[in-house]
Amino acid sequence: MDRGFGKTDRIDNWWRSPLAMAVYLGIAVIYATWRGFMEADFWIFEEFGRSAGNQTMAIESNDSHVLSPLFSPLIIPGEDGLGSWVPESLWWLSPAMFILIIPAGFRGTCYYYRKAYYRSFMASPAACAVSTPFGDYKGESRVFLFQNIHRYFMYLAVAYLFVLSYDVLLATQFSAKGVDSFGVSVGTLVLLLNVILLGGYTLGCHSFRHAIGGIRNRFANGGGRVAEACWKSCTKLNKNHNKWAIYSLFWVMFSDFYVYACTEGWWTDVVLFGGL
Ligand code: FES
């Protein structure tokens, strides 16, 4: 095989997929970083968000509460709740910075995303039968062994599903002047779909399947029937793990943008029924 960047004997458009993924992941990373910093309280960021008097993390109009998944659970440094634990020296941080390590660490070490960004950003290799620019492909050895931390991020990501589900519940609670009422807005449905897509992604995780299958390498001698059934259920999601990964990432970003657009007044979070 020819050696060098992008050298190959392939005559099909093999570069389309890694290029499209590079654009997709690049936009997602830039957007999440921008939003994460927007609610920080330092340098140019004090001109945005809650520092400037208009937080963009949660829709509070209509007496509802629709929290962006990029800021959940909400840790506002120095304020009541979880934020009261944050030392004053860290009050300049954005609420997103306390929690984004979990979704970023989970996705960054996911088996599917690893393949995607090794191809798209490192060209290592960019596609099957395409030469790598850095010598022979050696697999995930040496420093890349840190990717094994994925199995621990998985437990955090599963816990995160409960947090985001609680946010959906809060998004059905409308409250004003001591009066509470049930309701559903478009924002509620946006958050609900976010949990469904993240559930499909997280519960189809290879590490989750291994854990729920009883952390064993084979099902033999009639033992572990329940574990095997769990493993097989998980496999149904796992077969389309790439699609769950791509769609759920898009919807996390869209959910956040929806909240952002409503707090800026570009869109209105329409109440579909109930509410106050
Ligand atoms: S392998 Fe993709 S989330 Fe675990």
Image: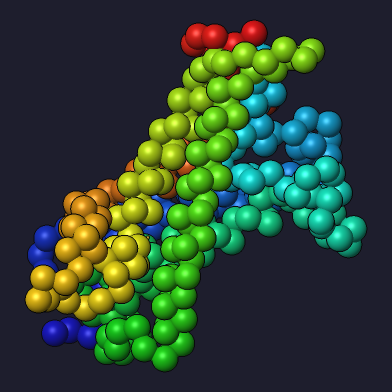
Q: Residue at x 55, y 15 (%)?
A: 183
Residue drawn at (38%, 58%) of the image:
22
Q: Quadrant of residue 7?
A: bottom left
Residue 223 sits above or below residue 250 on the image: below
Q: Give the x, y percent position of residue 103.
A: 51, 56
Q: Is residue 221 above or below residue 262?
A: below
Residue 265 in view, yes or no: no
The quadrant of the picture occupied by the N terminus is bottom left
Q: Is residue 191 left or right of residue 73?
A: left
Which one is in front, 155 or 189?
Answer: 155
Name the quadrant of the C terminus.
top right
- Pick whichever, 122 or 263, lies toward us: 263
**Depth order, front residue of 118/253:** 253
State whether residue 50 is above or below residue 154. above
Give the residue at x 76% y 37%. Answer: 49
Look at the image and tell me whether residue 64 can be seen.
yes
Q: Quadrant of residue 59?
A: top right
Q: How is the image coloured?
A: rainbow
Residue that sits furthest to the front in the current view: 222
Residue ID at (17%, 63%): 225
Please count the marks in the image: 0
* Residue 115 picture location, percent across and down: 31, 68
Instruction: Indicate left or right for 74 with 186 as reference.
Output: right
Q: Is residue 173 left or right of residue 4?
A: right
Where does the image place residue 27, in percent across and percent down from the top left?
Answer: 48, 49
Q: Position of residue 176 (x, y in %)?
A: 74, 14
